[in-house]
Amino acid sequence: MFPRITFSRVLAAPLWMRRVLAILLRSRQYTRPGWHWLARYPVLLIQTGVLLLIAWGVFLADFDGFHIIWHENVWQGTVAGIALALLLAFFWFTTYLLDRARNERNSRMFKFRPRRIRWRPYVYWWLATLGLFLIPAVTKNQMFFGEPWESDDGAGARVYFPVGVLGFAIVFSAALYKTSGRDRPKLVRRLGWGSFLVLAAAYLALSTFHVFAISGFCPFYSTAVNCLLCLGFATAVYGAILWFAARWRWADRLIYPTLIVLAIACVPGVNENEHRLPCMTITDDEGACRTYYDRPTNLFLVGSEPSASDREWKRDRHRAEDTIRHPLETDLISTSEMLTNWQERITRLDGFFPKQNQPAVVVTVSGGASTSALFSACMLFNLEEAYPGIGERIVLISGASGGMLGTAYYAAQCLPGGIISQLREKQLAYVRGVANRETYVNEVAQLREKFLAGFKRDFLTPLIQKWIFKDIPYNFFQSHTDNDRGRALEAAWSRSFKGAPDAKTGSWFEDRSPFDIPVASFRQWERKALIPSLVFSPMIVEDGRQLLISNLDLDALVEAEAKPEPYPALAAVEFFKLFPKAKEFRLGTAVRLNASFPFLSPAATLPTNPPRRVVDAGYYDNYGANVALKWIEANETDLRRVTDGKGVILLQLFTYGYETNVDLWTSVAEDDQYREHEGFIRAKGGLHSATTPLEGLFSSWRANMVYRVEDRIGYIEKWLNRFDPSPVWWRPIQPFFVRVRIPGPDDPPMNWYLRSDVIDDIENHYGDALKTMAILKSSTSTPDERVTALNNPKAQKAFPGLKNTVVAREDVEHPKTAKLNDVYKSRPIFNESTDLLLMKLPPANGPIGKEK
């Protein structure tokens, strides 16, 4: 008579409870896609998480990954936003297809009606994910940990990427809701499969293009778009595997083995093939053309079986190795001959120093991709401009990574017809009264812009394109190649840097790149001391020795200083003694070997038996000082002879300012973090404890290079200055050996792509400061020139004592006023070694401080 009262009916009776249950059931449909990413498709979650950390500036910020996505260029920033929105849409479409396939398989297996999989929740999750990527556009500086918005970043960097994301989201969502039905989302499936076909076709087309076009690349695809396209193709493969497994149960067993194989194939360095060097061709005695890889240099010079005794066998080995160290057909330059020619050139009557012996300058540069390349080239040009004739004093340049890119281009432009040669000609013409000051200043500014233009190009995109579309997919189909990302980097340099001479006639061609010229062709100009001698020193992986690539005979640098009897330790090996007939080995390849930091650049294999791999010079010495100091010590007698005892200046260019802070206990970051704390602060635990071994390893690696060089400089400084007289108050001492350190900006990003604000910081870091110092130190500069120099806003960055002040004429009436003394004391970017440099160099007379 009465209905049965149950507990469930009592709970479900109120209307509000029914609504709550309906909301819970409905919310389950909208939370299901997110839970499936976490439980079923973790690869999609990991990919999105990594991209989100890059977009927030937490991951890869030191390599400027943040600004690669938030690009300052309107085209690249907008296209990056569109590509990211399309990629995330493809992620969620893949999730939708996999859920439908899994639902259909379960309905067939368990004989029940398939559950309706709605497409709207996936769209909402897609829009929510896009919103997370746009958070940095509306945040203040440093809202997120490591979020690298700079105070001088323009509004465009915050706008272009969000415009691309929001534009694609609005257009795609509007089209989706306009044309798709409630239960039959045709457009979703069509757009999803269409995006899959577009991704696959674009990847295959670009892959085919990079196979046949060794030096070509597509400038329309930025680094961000290339990486996103690669992730999209990888997701398509991943989704196809899971889709087959979701539809057929037997395919479940193949999921993890297939994914493991694909992961191993795509991990950098795991499935890499042999990367060979281009232009290693030689012509044998019979006139046949072959490469060194066809008949590699044999390092097993005697039989594998010992002879009568171990001692005799070792003696035979060293005798055989001596044939490599001293080959008969080599044409390397004697250091003594080069220095003698350098003395004759620098004291010529029509030069900067007629009949005046000058101190020799040895330059070392640190590594750091395009950052160090631009800084090295910019500093050398600034020194040429501020101190006329200093470039002709440079006899040797050594260094690591990108720093040698800048110095190699500088050396090539020292030849007649080059930009540096034109600068010197204009300086001499100005001194002789041929040109007036206004004309001279304008012409120098034009030469400066032309000289530095190539370093502002994007070298990262060609490298990434070749890596993604050629190196990764074709590892399965070839055992060796010279068409790799290292070759792409060389081609990018050849496109960006123009102006080189003909090796035979010496005629200058503006459309030819110096990086396409063989290293051996520079031998004739280095012998005459027309250009500084370059020493590249990449490291050999198998034995940790340096590979010295130079036109000089550096046999004195091969042996270690400690020479146990009867055989000394061999610390290096010379490239042109291993391969004396490699006459086509190009300058660009030598620079690339010096800057090959895996995995971004491949480790090239030398044609030797057994094979030897070569990596970045920064693995052994990131500052190039080891080679320079050994060369100075080995040639002390010749240096004293050609300089008439005036000595040697070791000019060290450090790209990063913190590299010179070796006299401080704490870093700038630690000062900012712990300055306000008092008492003991507990050391960090957790993840920091787990990373202690790796942090210690990398710290010791860097510290060994820094402090080993400092110890060696101290030893050589005492040794070379042993003949200097004792200092007395009335006689200034000019030591024979002087070390000058010029640090760069505090912490610029390390990348083969530089954004505009980083370029401005590097260009203006020392240029105006050096010219200002030269004007202030010059006895021929006028008070008006000193006032103009000190009131320059760019130059005032180098002198904190001048900030927000206006220098008057009476403050600088003569070079020793109280105001100028205060200026000298307030220059933190110049240290006492800069005064030694100025003491070694004569006062600027002509282009600086002389009115015509």
Image (cartoon, rainbow, N blue to C red):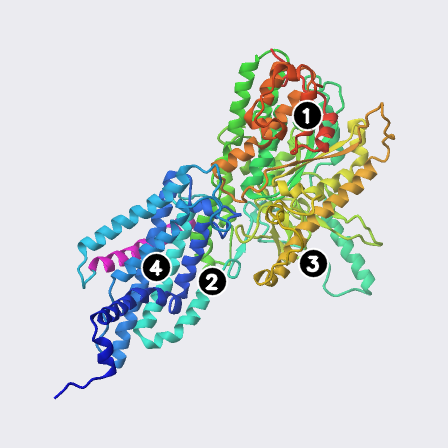
Residue plotted at (12% across, 88% down) = 1
Residue plotted at (61% across, 28% down) = 769
The kind of residue tagged 4 is: Phe
Provide the residue designation for mark 3. 300
Spatial separation of the CA atoms under disc 1 and disc 4: 62 Å
* Left or right: 384, with 206 as reference point: right
Viewer can see residue 507: no
User: Could you tell which of marks 1 and 2 lies nearer the N-terminus?
Assistant: 2
Circle 4 packing at 10 Å, graded few (<14), some (14-19), many (20+), is many
Provide the residue designation for mark 1. 822
User: Could you tell which of marks 3 and 2 lies nearer the N-terminus?
Assistant: 2
Q: Looking at the rendering, which quadrant does residue 722 occupy?
A: top right
The kind of residue tagged 2 is: Ala
Q: Please, what secondary structure does the residue beneath circle 4 have?
A: helix
Spatial separation of the CA atoms under disc 3 and disc 2: 34 Å
Contact, CB < 8 Å: mark 2 with mark 4? no
Q: Is residue 209 magenta?
A: yes
Determine which of the numbered discs, if any, sits on residue 91 in the image.
4
Provide the residue designation for mark 2. 265
Picture coordinates of residue 763, whole percent (x, y)? 55, 32
Q: Please, what secondary structure does the residue beneath circle 1 have?
A: helix
User: Could you tell which of marks 3 and 1 lies nearer the N-terminus?
Assistant: 3
Which label sits in the foreground, 2 or 4? 4
Picture coordinates of residue 358, whole percent (x, y)? 74, 25
Q: Is the magenta region chiefly helix, strand or loop?
A: helix
Which label sits in the foreground, 1 or 4? 1
